[in-house]
Amino acid sequence: MKDHNENNAAKEKRVSLDHSRRKILKLGSFAALGAAMGGAALLGKTTPSLAKANSGGTFYPGKLAPNETLNILIVNYDGGTLLDFAGPSEIFHRLPNTHVRYASLNGGDVTLEFGVKYGNTERLVDIEKTDLILVPGGSDLSAPMRPEYQAQIRRLAESAKYVTSVCNGSLVLAATGVLNGKRSACHWAFINKLSEYGAIPVSERFVEDDNGRFMSGGGVTAGIDFALRVAAKLRGEKAAEFTQLAIEYDPAPPFHSGHPRDARPEVIAMVDKVLPGASSGLARIPGVR
């Protein structure tokens, strides 16, 4: 009888945790996590994981008041890289009082890298302003480098409180002139082309300038790290850590070859063969002179 009761208790605990996890992932709000942790210890821990932060046990609030709305606009275009904005999108959608919109020059569908269709985007011209603009990168920047795209991106960036990019999306922003004299990250293969547009290339995974008005992430996967940094700065560490836990962002790369400083010479040579000039940060890409 004792074993039977213990088995039932364990089963009930698992069901409770599964239900809590589903609720967190579905609602994606800090309140959901608080409710889940208030009734039972998450994954058997006696101390809630949000009780302490990495910064000595103190959570720092974000720049925005909890009830202040944050409007985010993600620019889409043909040839863009899905993960550049899919990672940040996953983070931003889970932040409280935050609204995320997607827009392209003509609205509707765009064809991303590898032929991936992304649809139902708004028209850039129909968006009067946004608090934060994010320009992701791509394998072909011909579309966002066109004058029509550049004019809309420049218009929205000039009035935005926060101007951001991921990967070589910083080249698109730099080409509009809004990054002139500003520090910015970029994919390592293209980073030194930033200076050709007046920006200051910085080889880091996350870069900011003007007290956070300009924020950028390095290549492709840096978009998740970038978005968590943005979340912490604007919504506070607690919201950022909740989101990181909710999506189980716990990276453990199987290889240490994500950047030339770690990769083996023969691997770097393989990339250079596909992207001539990559190891010098001057790889060519369609749309960029």
Image (tube, helix red, strand yellow):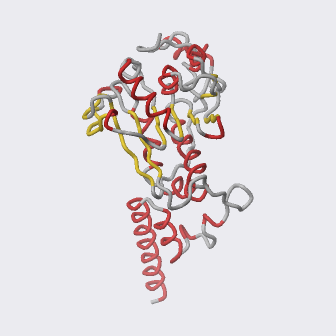
Tell me how many marks there are.
Answer: 0
User: At which x and y percent is residue 239?
Assistant: 55, 57
Q: Taking 136 as reference, is 47 left or right?
A: right
What residue sits 59% from the left and 38% below the top?
A: 213
Q: Is residue 119 visible?
A: yes
The front one of 54 and 259 is 54
The front one of 143 and 15 is 143
The front one of 226 and 278 is 226
To which quarter of the image does residue 194 belong? top right
To which quarter of the image does residue 138 belong? top left
Q: Is residue 266 visible?
A: no
Q: Taking 274 as reference, is 207 left or right?
A: right
User: At which x and y percent is residue 42?
Assistant: 54, 68
User: At which x and y percent is residue 215?
Assistant: 58, 36
The front one of 18 and 51 is 51
What residue sits 56% from the left and 70% below the top?
A: 44
Give the residue at the far right of this rendering. 56
What residue sits 40% from the left and 47% below the top?
A: 100
Give the residue at the far bottom of this rendering. 1
- Vertical order, 91 against 58 (above or below): above
Which quadrant would the N terminus be assigned to in this image?
A: bottom left
To which quarter of the image does residue 198 belong? top right
- Vertical order, 258 against 231 (above or below): above
User: At which x and y percent is residue 97?
Assistant: 45, 57
What residue sits 27% from the left and 33% below the top?
A: 107
